[in-house]
Amino acid sequence: MKKTAILAAALLAGTSIGASAETLRWARAGDSLTLDPHAQNEGPTHTLSHQIYEPLIIRDMTGAFQPALATDWAPKADDPNVWVFNLRQGVKYHDGSDFTAEDVVFSINRAKSEDSNMKELLSSVVEVRAVDDHTVEFVTDGPNPILPSNLTNMFIMDKGWAEANDAVEVQDVEGGETTFAATNAMGTGAYKLVSREPDVKTVLTQNENYWGKDTFPMDVTEIIYTPIQNAATRVAALLSGEVDFIQDVPVQDLGRVAETEGLVVKTAPQNRVIFFGMNMGADDIANDDVEGKNPLADVRVRKAMSMAINREAIKQVVMRGQSQPAGMIAPPFVNGWTEEMDSSAQTDIDAAKALMEEAGYADGFSIQLDCPNDRYVNDEAICQAAVGMLAQIGITVNLDAKPKAQHFPLITNGETDFYMLGWGVPTYDSEYIFNFLVHTRGEDRGSWNGTGFSNPEVDEMIVSLASETDLEKRNETIQSIWNVVQDEQLYIPIHHQVLNWGMTDAVGIEVSPEDDPKFKFFTMN
């Protein structure tokens, strides 16, 4: 409550109801984790970065490709292992320095480094080279037909700025490091950083020299971004006119916001699945009461836990109808999704109890569930509901909910045995899910695989996806991998998230399936 009061006070102190139409006052539940564009692969972090930095290619508000720092791209005519990107000319960074191919080479190599949370997206890239100031070649380990899809959140930094400010290395977020690039930014984007107080307020102003000034509406000239974790306070700020736009209208307040004169709610399915992960790989786990073995290592226990979750009840009671129950951890937007797999999760308490007894846990066990409380729609409430559902099959769940900044390192550092995670798929292809969540955790893949699952044969299939040009064969491999993921119950899918954006009727924009508003597209009436 104290933190909520501080945030609300900061919001009131930093804005006024009479702000000009060109100022967009934006709020959401959680802040960006860092300004370092390669340190965290996380939605709110990318959303803020998209205002300041740019990738070679972006997705517009419908999810379609649009040229950004690259004007066009194609495989090289005489070498299928090379993609050629022609860069936009005349682009300047916020400090007036020139954007060149050297910056692209620097940024891609930086994003491939050990501490980068983006490296899985570049695992097939063996070299990136500047042909001249405005041409870059990506050399891949075999032909990679979907390389452009992997670059839409791959932000380009100014090499000279990074070198001058000791920001060449990526911030080690999991290690608790703070760097210059974590709190400062220098991009080519439509907005430049004015000030930043993490978890309090970030102010951006329009880049008057932006190359896209005549391409995009650019009605927003100033952005005041205020994270407001408390749902009631966030809605109150919208209702009172203190903010113009919130990304996450709580489901219980949709009607109240929509019925308020001057406000609108826009809703769309999100390209994201919410699920639970389980540490099945350890011989024994720390956060349970079973000595000498790991109950999660038994697939029967994992399947029983999935059967105990009543997804329809979560949809109706917790989400007020604003979710789509899931049976796989791929959204319907994604290549590899099938209706058959997505409808496979069924609630069956009797069958779940029988599996628990068969596995030797008729009396159940206790375990800790780690959950974020400021990242997904009703994240903590979903976890609370799961606690009661799992109790029906004898599993006593101790819930530990905390802000995402503390929650996510538990997964990436391998310090949780049972956890909530949500996963969006910006490439719209299953390879992205497999690279991060299924492949054995290693140097260039599996960084978010907190399950401990490791299968060399599956790893080999995952790696093959990056260079398979026969799309029919590639899709068959994707299906084979999904069969293993489903049979092993690596994760417990809960639902596909639904987005609810709330805004004043002066704001013109449609909901992006990526939940990543790019304010250069916004109109202000």
Image: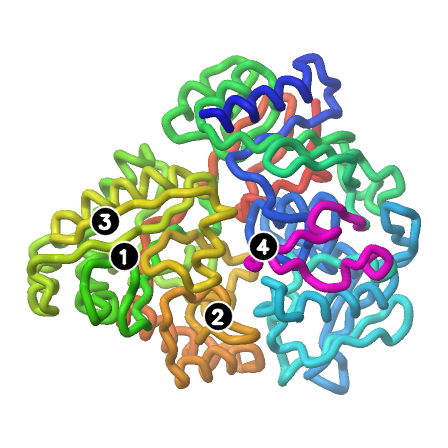
Q: Which residue is mark 1?
A: 343
Q: As shown in the figure, which amino acid type bears the numbered disc 3?
A: Val
Q: Which residue is mark 2?
A: 446
The numbered disc on residue 220 is none
Q: Which residue is mark 3?
A: 397
What secondary structure is found at the residue carrying circle 1?
Answer: loop
The answer to which of marks 3 and 4 sits earlier in the sequence is 4
Residue 380 pos. (x, y %): 36, 40
Viewer-proximal residue among 430 and 101: 101
Q: State the residue at coordinates (55%, 75%).
A: 443
Q: Disc 1 vs disc 4: which is toward the camera?
A: 4
Q: Disc 2 vs disc 1: which is toward the camera?
A: 2
What secondary structure is found at the residue carrying circle 2?
Answer: loop
Q: Is residue 335 among what the camera can see?
A: no
Going by the image, does 80 lie left or right of 469? right
The answer to which of marks 3 and 1 sits earlier in the sequence is 1
**C-alpha separation, residue under disc 1 versus residue under disc 4:** 40 Å
The answer to which of marks 4 and 2 sits earlier in the sequence is 4
Q: Which residues are magenta?
A: 161-187
What secondary structure is found at the residue carrying circle 4?
Answer: loop
**C-alpha separation, residue under disc 3 versus residue under disc 4:** 29 Å
Q: State the residue at coordinates (41%, 24%).
A: 253
Viewer-proximal residue among 451 and 22: 451
Residue 28 pos. (x, y %): 54, 34
Q: As shown in the figure, which amino acid type bears the numbered disc 1?
A: Ser
The answer to which of marks 3 and 2 sits earlier in the sequence is 3
Q: Which residue is mark 4?
A: 176
What secondary structure is found at the residue carrying circle 3?
Answer: strand
Residue 344 pos. (x, y %): 25, 60
Residue 277 pos. (x, y %): 35, 59
**C-alpha separation, residue under disc 4 versus residue under disc 2:** 21 Å
